[in-house]
Image (cartoon, rainbow, N blue to C red):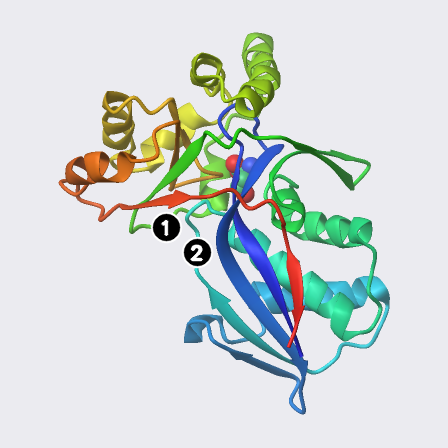
Amino acid sequence: MFRVKVPATTANLGPGFDSLGLAFKLYSYFTFKKSDKPLIITGCEEKYQNENNLVYYSFKKTFEYMNLPLMNVEINIESSVPVCRGLGSSATCIVGGVLGASILSGKNLPMEEIFKICNSIEGHPDNIAPALFGGLTVSLVENDIPYTVKYNISKDLNFYVFIPEFELSTEKARNVLPKEISFKDGIYNISRTGVLLKALELGDEKLIKISLSDKLHQQYRLPLIDESSEIIKICNSNNVLGTVISGAGPTLLGITKNSNLINEIFSQVKLLNNNWKIKKLDVDFSGTIIEYL
Ligand code: HSE
């Protein structure tokens, strides 16, 4: 029996659409063991305890990839990562299922192949890369093969997530995006992404503030997130350097050097309607870890 521990992630970080990602110390745990029955899933909500479960789907896809007959399996899921909130819960399930199959089958695929299978299931690598490798990652896909590099991130930065009680599906948040963008907007995001990476490494407040802005996705998505403008206003009035949509939303991510922000902001946020939860999350530098039990 073994357990796959996978961190939550935030994707995009403003301008880095579908490429930048950051892992947080908030985890999903997936325990795998051989079973007499074709499938047993425990731990998660009952509506996920069936063969449509994304962990099991990813497990099955990996057996297909390895060209091996599917094994009977018992999977226990314990997750602190909220579902459909833009904190990489799908990526944790995919990574869990793919690694579960790789290890339970005894095949122990190399990490490049694990990354490739996960990316083909998720469709983009920005959450998968930090979930697997930890830290701040920038990824690209060339001929269906994902590549990723890690960047340093200043220890002086603090990350606050604002999680509303409603869900927003990635599909819905991708459907509102334009099919084409202007050359000018492309330059706007490329230049900011490059500067942002160095600014995050240095903890440079002025440059982080400027380079977190984006023209490719957030303006289309913010209307889908009720009270997002109120959260951004509250953050701005408390000198948060920038507040961006975490992944496809609806969670918002605030970056600041102030480590005592929660009390000041909480009293204002609690007056809103969507029961927003605020969490200060530390960066996870380890990525996915396999624990043998
Ligand atoms: N980069 C993705 C998006 C992350 O913003 O749609 C969500 O999977």
Residue 140 place in picture, x, y as percent: 72, 33
Q: Quadrant of the C terminus?
A: bottom right
Q: Position of residue 96 (x, y in %)?
A: 63, 62
Residue at the far left in the pictured view:
271
Where residue 60 sits, quadrant-wise, is bottom right
Q: CA distance from mark 1 to mark 2?
A: 8 Å
Q: Is residue 12 above or below residue 56?
A: above
Q: State the image coordinates of residue 58 (x, y, percent, origin top left).
A: 66, 63
Classify residue 72 as left or right of residue 162: right
Answer yes or no: do the residues labelled 1 and 2 have beta carbons within 8 Å? yes
Left or right placement of residue 283 versus residue 138 in this view: left
Classify the position of the N terminus by image quarter.
Answer: bottom right
Q: Nearer the viewer, residue 182 or 138?
A: 138
Can residue 58 be seen in the rendering of this structure?
A: no
Q: Are there few (<14), some (14-19), or many (20+) residues within 10 Å of tag 2? A: some
- Disc 1 residue type? Glu
Name which quarter of the figure residue 92 lies in.
bottom right
Q: Nearer the viewer, residue 259 or 255?
A: 259
The residue where tag 1 is placed is 167
Identity of the residue drawn at 63% across and 50% down: 287
- Which residue sits at x=82%, y=65%? 108
Question: Which label belongs to residue 9?
Answer: none
Mark 1, secondary structure of its residue: loop
Residue 279 picture location, percent across and down: 34, 46
Circle 2 sits in a helix, a strand or a loop, which is it?
Answer: loop
- Amino acid at circle 2: Val
Q: Residue furthest bottom?
A: 36
Residue placed furthest toward the top: 184
Name the residue located 42 percent from the left edge and 36 percent from the top edge: 159
Which residue in the structure is indicated by mark 2? 83
Q: Earlier in the sequence, mark 1 or mark 2?
A: 2
Q: Is residue 4 visible?
A: yes
